[in-house]
Image: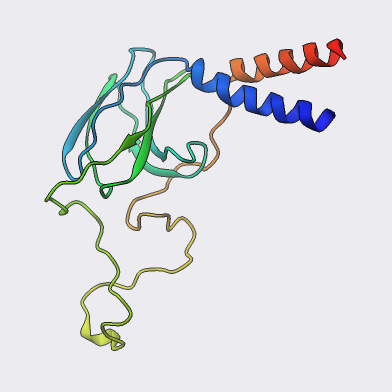
Amino acid sequence: MFTTLVSVALFVSLAIQGVLADFDVETPKLVQCKDVEIKWEDTDGPYSLVVVKSTDPCGDILADLGDPKDNSFRWKVNFPAGSKLMFSVEDDKGDEGWSNEMVVQSSSDSSCLPPQPQSSTTSTDSSSTDTPPVPVGAANAGEFPGITNSAPAMRQFSIPAMAITALVAAVATLAL
């Protein structure tokens, strides 16, 4: 019974966090190696802007886009077509805003993408290639080698979501 209550409380807190984002972030169309303008509701800057996997938004940060002072930012989409991404913006007070899921669209331009490792079946002689070695199993190598993962992996839960979850758990316990 208690396990069910905890599971429900965690699910509800995640759902509420998405619904009660502190401010809105637009969801632009992303095209591989093309510039995009990211905009969000004007709050207290400077901001922290990061790119995360939409399938694991609280997991590793795929790209730290810096700390813009204004409520918009231009960025060259340096992820391959098919990547499922979200933007996370945190303002100076720690309030967060999230975009919806975006799938990177294809383009004929791949100049901004990191080089792909060569297939091991083409050559076993490492002196015949000019491509630098790619670390295997290195910490923070990530899904997209060459893209910096410089921010912490865990995203904090917002205080309102946690407070509402605690309230739901307390009410459910009293109702029993």
Q: Between 64 and 125, which is closer to the camera in this rendering?
A: 125
Q: Find residue 155 and report its horizontal and vertical position in percent.
A: 53, 34
How many numbered discs sit on the rendered protein? 0
Q: Is 7 left or right of 19, judged from the image as shown?
A: right
115 shown above or below 52? below
* Residue, far right: 176
On-image quarter of the C terminus: top right
Q: Between 108 and 1, which is closer to the camera in this rendering?
A: 1
Q: Can residue 94 be seen from the camera position used here?
A: no
Q: In which quarter of the image is residue 1?
A: top right
The residue located at (27%, 41%) in the rendering is 104
Q: Quadrant of residue 83?
A: top left
Q: Find residue 37 and report its horizontal and vertical position in percent.
A: 21, 28
The residue located at (84%, 11%) in the rendering is 175
Q: Is 29 left or right of 149, judged from the image as shown?
A: left
Q: Find residue 73 and report its horizontal and vertical position in percent.
A: 25, 27
* Residue, far left: 108
Q: Is 74 left or right of 98, judged from the image as shown?
A: left
Q: Can residue 18 be seen from the camera position used here?
A: yes
9 shown above or below 63? above
The colouring scheme, among rainbow, by chain, secondary structure or one colour, is rainbow
120 shown above or below 98? below
The residue located at (24%, 62%) in the rendering is 115
